[in-house]
Amino acid sequence: MMNQNERSKMTKLEWGVVFSVLASAASLIFSAGVVWTTVQVHDRDISALKTKGDETTDRLARMETKIDMLLEQRISKSGGM
């Protein structure tokens, strides 16, 4: 009788351990999902910033070209140096 009772308690203990392990695994999976989502959002934001940076670089290049053209016109009007 005592042996059966000990086996029953051990089974309850084992179920507790199994539940704890499953809860820990679920917590890890949830945390990994949160981190993965955050990484994806930041990756998208970085891509948007890179695109914006490329557009800004192109705009600055056009402005520089226009400034160079204006300087050349001014130099040619003033008779050159």
Image: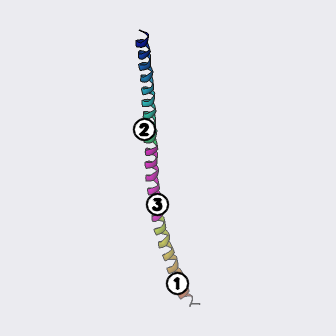
Question: Image check: 31 left or right of 78?
Answer: left
Q: Amino acid at mark 1?
A: Glu
- Residue topped by disc 3: 50
Of the pair 47 and 19, the residue shown nearer to us: 19
Q: Name the residue rendered at 54%, 83% in the picture.
A: 74
Q: Amino acid at mark 2?
A: Ile
N-terminal-most mark, 1 or 3:
3
Label 3's element? helix
Magenta includes 40? Answer: yes
- The local crowd at label 2, few if under 14, some if 14 to 19, many if 20 or more residues have their Cα within 10 Å, is few
Q: Name the residue rendered at 46%, 65% in the picture.
A: 54
- Residue topped by disc 1: 72
Q: Which mark is residue 29?
A: 2
N-terminal-most mark, 2 or 3:
2
Of the residues tagged 2 and 3, which is closer to the observer? Answer: 2
Q: Residue furthest top?
A: 1
Q: Name the residue rendered at 43%, 34% in the picture.
A: 25
Q: Could you tell me residue 73's position as x and y percent?
A: 51, 84
Would you place residue 22 above or below residue 56 in this image? Answer: above
Question: Image check: 78 left or right of 18?
Answer: right
Q: Give the overall secondary structure of the magenta segment.
A: helix
Q: Could you tell me residue 26's position as x and y percent?
A: 42, 33
